[in-house]
Amino acid sequence: MPVDLRETRLPGVGVKYAFRTATGGRLAIIIHNDGQREIYFYRRASDDEPTAVIELHDDEARQLGAVIGGAYERPKIVEELELALGELQIEWVDVPDTSPAIGRTLAELGLRAKTGVTVIAILREPEPVSGAQPGDVIQQGDTLVAVGKAGQFAEFRRLLAHGPFEP
Amino acid sequence: MTLAELAITVGLLGALGLVARRFGLSAIPAYLLAGLLLGPNEPTQLALISPSEVTEFVAQLGLVFLLFFLGLEFSLERLSRSGRHFGLGGTVDLVANAGVGLIVGVAAFGTTSAALVLAACIYVSSSAIAVKGLTDFRRLGDDETDLILAVLVFEDIAIAFMLGFAAAGGGGAPETLVLVAKALLFITAGVAASRWLARPLDRLLDRLSLEFFLLAVFGFLVATAALAEELGLSEAIGALMAGIVLSETSIRDQIEERFFSFRDIFAALFFFVFGLSIDVSALGDVGWIVAIAVIATLFGKIGAGWIAGRLGGFTSRQGFNAGVALVAHGEFTIILAQIASGNSSIDADARTDLVAFAGLYVLVTATVGIVLMKESKRLGRILFPIRRLAPET
């Protein structure tokens, strides 16, 4: 059901968004010009005193918005999901900050030759690398998306963390 | 005014402001009270500071900043989005309260221009106090808040047109017409400039470092105010126009952010300096005007809020809440009286009375208004009990 969201400008204060909830209550969200947010909840739409008022700073409001919007489901998947593809698995492997692999290309590392695991993509800010090429350089903070057999990942992680790699 | 006197002044302003805040009241009456206490008029026990060129100048800066910020809010695009209550609610409030004000004004000063200024003083509610009350008492989420804020914007615009008259109007019909025409021309030029000058100004100010950005904006503001003063209009109109010109630029938010603290300090001093000139012993002269005006305001504002509310589709309680929020008077009443006090076409005695009236009237309505506002929902439940609907079958 589409939500009937009403936007009103409050001169000198900010913007107000209000809508009725399916359970008969009313929600009003005020975004102040200074970034402060307020959420007013009226248990019944006709109540003249709010049942609850929540005040949030800008960063808290963004965090809350992301949680409610479902954005936080994804990183969890990225960390933990192990997808079975027959015998093969896809894993998300964080590059340790101390890794000797940082600053080298995938070709130089030779991870596939040594462990059998193939790097297929690199997640990094701001732009992830889809379809990793031999010439791509590993950077600090990268997360590697890798395909391999279940038993090969332990060696892959060890090698990534400690090397050794040829100079 | 010496540095030591300024230190005492600012100390007292801060202390009284904190006390007012502790009791949930607006700081504006507190600043006026500080001026009243330290000023040369009755009561004289604490008389420490007398109005001088320095205090006048500081107050002038406060006035300029207050109107500059009003102008910044005035962009055409924002006004066009201020919603459905703007025309209807604003008109009901204008007819009711400017009417009530005019009756009180004529009763006090006869059919003079002082009566017109008094009417405007009674008409215009305090945006600052209303917004503070709505925020403090958690009313921003209420539906009727839209109506209250729309009415306040309408009042601000109406007052912008009144400023020119208060500053110099009232000599004779031709002079007044010329003046009104000049003021209209000046404001129109400002609005036009905000359309055409926004881009170049943007590019220019964007490239400046912070130090020069502040200087450039401040210089522009003061120059526009001075120009308006030279033209025989009030510096207030100039400052308002400077705000309007910059209201369409993309650096508007940045200007607000950087000049907020300047405005707050100088506006506090503006109200303080105004307080210096309030003479409590004039209570005998203007006491009855204040009393009638306060009662008229209670009926006028609450009535207008209720009518505008009912016409706008609100319940009686919501309309009552809206009206109560408009009872408090503040910055604009003081600004109008301050500007009129320099208008030589108004009788000198009437000017003194206007200043005393505005000060006392704001002290009373700002306090009564905020107390009523705090209790308005409880009062509303008593005044407008819910009628039971026939049970559904």
Image: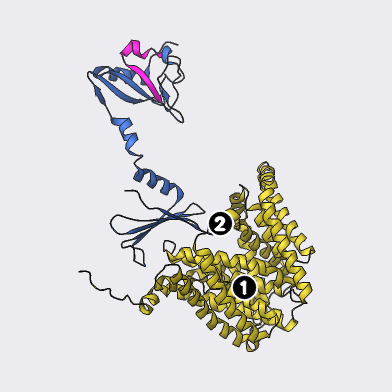
Chain colours: A blue, B yellow
Q: In the rendered structure, the residue with mark 2 lies on which chain?
A: B
* Residue A61 located left or right of residue B99: left
* Magenta residues (range): A109-123
Tell me what residue is drawn at x 28 percent, y 75 percent.
B388
Instruction: Tell me residue B8's x, y (percent).
Output: 64, 69
Query: Do marks 2 and 1 share a chain?
Result: yes
Q: Is residue B12 above or below residue A4?
A: below
Q: Toward which corner of the image does residue B293 lie, by quadrant?
A: bottom right
Mark 2–mark 1 distance (CA, rounded to whole Å): 26 Å
* Residue B251 located left or right of residue B383: right
Q: Earlier in the sequence, mark 2 or mark 1?
A: 2
Instruction: Tell me residue A135's x, y (percent).
Output: 45, 15
Q: Is residue B114 above or below residue A133?
A: below
Q: Are marks 2 and 1 in contact (CB under 8 Å)?
A: no
Q: In the rendered structure, the residue with mark 1 lies on which chain?
A: B
In this view of the protein, which residue sits in the foreground, B292 or A46?
A46
Q: Which residue is tagged 2?
A: B80
Tell me what residue is drawn at x 27 percent, y 17 percent.
A152
In this view of the protein, which residue sits in the foreground, B33 or B66?
B66
* Label 1 crowd bin: few (<14), some (14–19), many (20+), radius 10 Å: many
Give the residue at the far left of this rendering: B393
Callout 1 amino acid: Thr
Instruction: Tell me residue A77's x, y (percent).
Output: 30, 32
* Residue A83 located left or right of residue B221: left
Q: Which mark is residue B232?
A: none
Instruction: Tell me residue B138's x, y (percent).
Output: 42, 64
In this view of the protein, which residue sits in the foreground, A13 or A24?
A24
Q: Toward which corner of the image does residue B45 lie, by quadrant?
A: bottom right
Q: Is residue A121 magenta?
A: yes
Q: Toward which corner of the image does residue B360 lie, by quadrant?
A: bottom right
Q: Which mark is residue B333?
A: 1
